Amino acid sequence: MKTIIFDMDGVIFDSERVIFDEWKELAKKYGFENLEIPYFQCIGVNAARTREIMLDFYGQDFPYDDYCKEQSRRYHEKYDGGRLPLKKGVEELLQYLKKEGFFVAIASSTRHTLVEQQIIDAGLRPYFDRIIGGDMVTKSKPNPEIFQKALEGLEAIPGETIVIEDSFNGIRAAFNAGMIPVMVPDMIAPDDEMREKAEVILNNLLEVKEYLEKQM
C-alpha cells in the first residue's frame, strides 16, 4: 500500500505563521517578551504540551488560558470559512496522490474537530482517507503515537510510509515511528539533527510531488 501522512499546520496551511502573528500582537498588548523562544518550542506539539511550555517559560502565574482564548478568537475571526492560506503546491500534490491511488492521512497536533473543519472549509476533505487530531492520542509529538494511530487497521508498513512534516517534533515523531520523514521547513530552518533524521529536505510540496514521481 502506498501511504502518505501529512501534518497540517505549516504543511497544508500557512497557519503557524499567522498564529504567531496573533501571539505577537498579544505580546505587544500585554507586555510579555521573548515570545519566539517558547513559541518555536510549541510548534508540532498538542495543546496540553503547548500550555506546559508557555507556563514553564513565563511562570505558573502567566494567564496563558486567557491569552489563548483571545488569540483563538482573533484567529478564527480572520481565517475561518476557508480563508486560511494554503501552502504552495498543496492541491497539485493531493491531486497527484489521488490519481496514483495513495492512502492519504493527516496526523495533526491540532484537535480533531478543528482539523476536520479547516480541511472541509478549504475544499480538501475528499483527498484524505483518515484524519487524526492531537486530542485522539495520549502522547504528543515527538512520541510516534499519532502516526502509529494513523496506520491502524491498514496493511501499511511503517518503513514504507512517508510522513510530510515541517516541525522538528514532527520529524522526530516520524523517525521514532520507523517511517520515512520528509521535511518541508516552514518557520524554522533545519539543523544537523533534522538533516540526519529526515530522508530528504525539500522547499515546498511541489518538490515533494517531483520527489515522489522519481521514487515511483
Image (tube, helix red, strand yellow):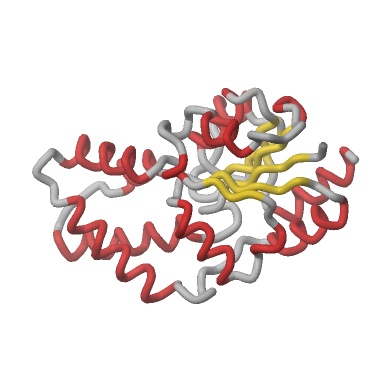
195 shown above or below 123:
above
Image quarter where the C terminus lies is top right
For the residue pair 150 and 7, the one nearer the viewer reads as: 150
Residue 89, can we see it? no
Q: Name the residue: 17% across, 42% down.
A: 58
Q: Which percent across, then down, holds residue 13?
A: 56, 60
Residue 99, can we see it? yes
Q: Name the residue: 49% across, 49% down.
A: 187
206 shown above or below 56:
below
Q: Which percent across, then down, holds residue 158?
A: 70, 27
Q: Name the residue: 25% across, 61% down.
A: 69
Which quadrant holds residue 93?
A: bottom right
For the residue pair 92 and 155, the one nearer the viewer reads as: 155
- Please identify the residue farthest to the left as the structure is shown: 61
Q: Which percent across, then down, holds residue 182?
A: 67, 38
Q: Name the residue: 52% across, 30% down.
A: 145
